[in-house]
Amino acid sequence: MKYDLVVVGGRVAGSIAAYQAAKNGLQVLLLEGNPEIGTPVQCAGGVSDSFFKSTDIKPLPEFTCTRITAATINGPYGASITTGNPIIRGYIIERKIFDKYLALRAAEAGADVLAGSRVKDLMFHEGSVSGVKFRGPDGTCEVKSGIVIAADGIQSCVGRMAGLNTRFRPGELCSCAQYEVTGFDVDDETMEFYFGSVFAPSGYLWVFPKGDGRANVGVGVRRTRCSDNGPLHYLNRFISRAGCSRLEFNAGAVPVGGPIRKTYTDGLLVVGDAAGQVDPLTGGGIHVAAECATIAADVATDAIESQRTDAAFLSKYEDTWREQIGKNLDRSLKFRKVLESLSDDELDTLIGSFDGKDLNSISKISLLKILRHYPKILKMLKNIL
Amino acid sequence: MKHDPSRCMHCGACVNVCPSGALELEDTLLIGDGCRECLACAAVCPVDAMGCEDEV
């Protein structure tokens, strides 16, 4: 068996890369290690309108739960602001169904998709990645390929097999736990966020509505900064007040320390969570993964067509994604560092100071007026803006 | 290093951060010879499935 491209991992990054490459005319194999595409879920499901605009994927009713038009940000001591700013408009999606839809879309574009097929090793030819060995329902198989795209998520073993450093430091991972609950009092159009050490030290707690009293309620914390307690501790504390039923439990970790240093080598590209392509401020990775996966697929297509699968040629992938989104990720990382340096008091006062102001039309000047009482934040913002 | 399979959610965070590359995720988590009990895995596990003998 030989393919132009083998994509390892059938979630957002993998399925979008496989779709794009197949659409470009490559022979593509998409491998997913889990027996079912989309499970287990490791996501809160918030996706903004810009994702659907930029990918040409339609927000179909089968995987969208609710339309989001507002966000409420709550401080540790009760300060609260709600905004209907257009940038937060989007949907809460059902990832299980969404992921399967994306894999189906890749298959319809011509990619071969195999679930339950876990990559055990890479094959090399003259120092370049030349294929994969995987174990699946039919036993162990070897598949040759011109290029491998590693979209294998936080484990990121495939990039490591090719000699790339895909390891994160413990402080760069946000550990998350989430319940899907029912019987919860939520507004179906509003995402809720809770900040402060009561709710989620060095992270945040979220409540994303899914309609009819259902919601994804989750917590993300960096345990290196609150090591005694994991996210479950904070999640249970929040949920116990509500006394609601739990329909699902998810857990996982999100890389929030920015991308890995090098995302390509001879015959291989790394995309998505595996490459740390996640917004460090929000932990959101769907839109970033989609953009990087599309770039990876296009570069892989050029590489196959020019018969140049060496690192020198594939470096174009990294140049392009860094140029397109690198700056945004850097800025988000700086913002996150500003936020996490604030005490609970400062956080609550800051959130409170926006109360009653029209956040939809807040200008840079009025923002600076609010922030002039926070010299620490201003000083840090100077380094960012 | 002790691993509690009844809590483990197979998320792979520990596999990523292990500095010795001693962890491998199959149907269950495998702890290889390289483990130096540095507890990097415990520092990222979302469900407290990793820890020293007396902790889990």
Image (cartoon, rainbow, N blue to C red):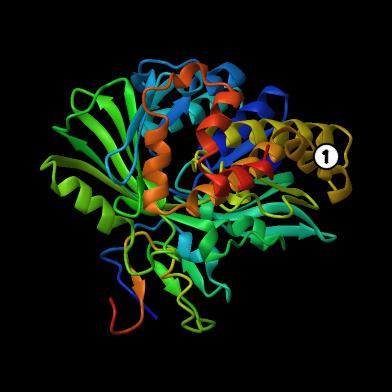
Q: Quadrant of residue A67?
A: top left
**Residue, disc 1:** A316
Q: Amino acid at mark 1?
A: Lys
Q: Nearer the viewer, residue A267 or A183?
A: A183
Quarter of the picture containing the C terminus of chain A is top right
Determine whether A25 is above or below A96 in the image.
Answer: above
Which type of secondary structure does the marked residue at label 1 adopt?
A: helix
For the question of whether residue A111 can be seen, the reply is no
Q: Position of residue A224 (x, y in %)?
A: 45, 66
> Quick one: label 1, few (<14), some, or many (20+) residues within 10 Å?
some
For the question of whether residue A90 can be seen, the reply is yes
Q: Position of residue A47 (x, y in %)?
A: 46, 27
**Is residue B43 shown left or right of residue A192?**
right
Quarter of the picture containing the N terminus of chain A is top right
Q: Nearer the viewer, residue A5 or A41?
A: A41
Q: Quadrant of residue A381?
A: top right
The structure residue drawn at horizontal position 73% and vertical position 32%, both measured from the top left corner, is A324
The structure residue drawn at horizontal position 55% and vertical position 30%, both measured from the top left corner, is A369
Q: Position of residue B26 (x, y in %)?
A: 44, 63
